[in-house]
Amino acid sequence: MSSSYMEPDTFRMHLNSLIQGLRNVTFMVQKQKGELVEYEDWYTRFVKEVAPKPLMRWAVRSRNRIVKESDLELLSEAKIRWVRNWAVKSERNFSFPPRMSLRDMLAVIFADPGNPRAGVVTISRRWVDKALPDYELLHATREVFIELSRLLHAGHTAAGVTSCALDSREPSCVASRIDPQPLACMDINSGGRQEHLDLDDGFGIHEVEHRVIRDERLVQKANKRYGTFTVTATHPIEVAPQLMETARMVLQKDKCHMPMMWSYRDGKIVDMISPNFVDQNGKYLMFHRLADRVESLRADGIVLVIEAWWAQGEERDAQGQLIPPRDRKDRKEVLHVAAATRGGERLSLLAPFSRTKLGKITIEDTITDSERESDVLWPFMPIFERWNQMDERDER
């Protein structure tokens, strides 16, 4: 479905096939119940848990409709996200013909003089079923897939096994091990279905992703340059102080520190990324795309290391607007390590530093800021909002 997203007929064909395949999972389990260990226990629990969930009811009704009546009634939408700053954001959905390009959609939207003319706009292609208007279809079918994976995981656990006799599959993330979590390749917020526009400059913002394969020779080279260190904690809040120590070592040696973010799920790292940007609008966009990534990964914790501007207290301009640290005369450079969890835990570690004319770095003592609504956590609001949305949909 994902690879044919821009091809309406092919997308519909794969959608129909997938929905029937998902429904067949429960049919096959029921058919073999006499051979399955503790079937009544784990299958009854599954039915009780999913029966009230609208997505699972939609999947059953959709399969019946496809088999007995006709295709689902698909609607082509564009989701528009406009970001002016950390506090000002809006989202709207528009309907468009299925084969209209994203650029043509932008042209139609901004032909209206009442639409915003500053900030960053992201337009995302969305296929929705008329019977399920609040869910994009990759998202909806992935949630059903996860529920069924949990069912199969429960059955395997009861039988004392962890994997099936599957051969190699394409994509490679489809493996023999039964995992109750989403597959890594199930990206429901792909950059390939989005266009970004910087309204201040009138230029598009293009995403480029480079994958880096771990190279043990480079690891040894890095250990020689920075020294060896070990991050032993598994909880993001506990990891943050350890990463601050390593970040201070890197800053002293390199005179800068690239942004780095680790995503956690159930105490394990599921993603590591170095997000980069060239200006403030790019930074706004970057944090919203990090929120997309957190949602796709179902991450329940994050830790981010980044250089930033910081100033103590608040200052406001003549109009009463808050002056950001980057525009204040008393600003300081800081090494910022921020950690947060979906459960509401927050921690900011700030290490102010200065540079001499010859480039020497002097790093001050680390300041601990655990306030939930601290201004240094404003950039993380898109991630916090996304977690709230996931909670509202009961996506666990």
Image: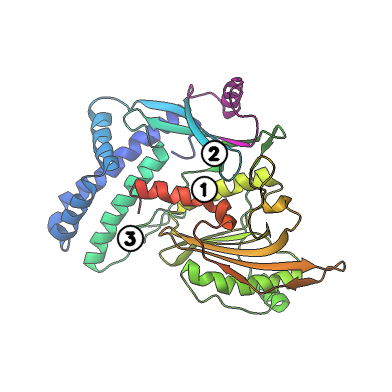
Q: What residue type is labelled 3?
A: Ala
The N terminus lies in quadrant: top left
Assess whether mark 2 and mark 3 are in contact (beta carbons under 8 angstroms).
no
Residue under the point 50% across and 43% down: 189
Q: Residue 248 location in percent, x, y?
A: 67, 72
Q: Quadrant of residue 138?
A: top left
User: From this viewpoint, is residue 233 visible?
Assistant: yes
Q: What residue type is labelled 1?
A: Pro
Disc 1/disc 3 C-alpha distance (Å): 41 Å
Q: Mark 2 or mark 3, which is nearer the start of the sequence?
A: 2
Disc 2/disc 1 C-alpha distance (Å): 10 Å
Closer to us: 16 or 330: 330
Helix, strand, or loop for circle 3?
loop
Total labels drawn: 3
Mark 3 closeness class: few <14, some 14–19, many ≥20 residues within 10 Å: few
Q: Residue 86 location in percent, x, y?
A: 58, 46
User: From this viewpoint, is residue 35 visible?
Assistant: no
Image: 271 above or below 83? below
Q: Residue 171 location in percent, x, y?
A: 47, 50
> Residue 89, labelled with which disc?
2
Specify whether residue 32 is painted magenta.
no
Closer to us: 184 or 235: 235
Q: Mark 3 or mark 1, which is nearer the start of the sequence?
A: 3
Assess whether mark 1 and mark 2 are in contact (beta carbons under 8 angstroms).
yes
What residue span does the magenta drawing correspond to? Answer: 95-122
Residue named by callout 3: 165
Name the front one of labels 3 and 2: 2
Residue named by callout 1: 382
Q: Which amino acid does label 2 sit on?
A: Lys
The C terminus lies in quadrant: bottom left
Image: 124 above or below 190? above
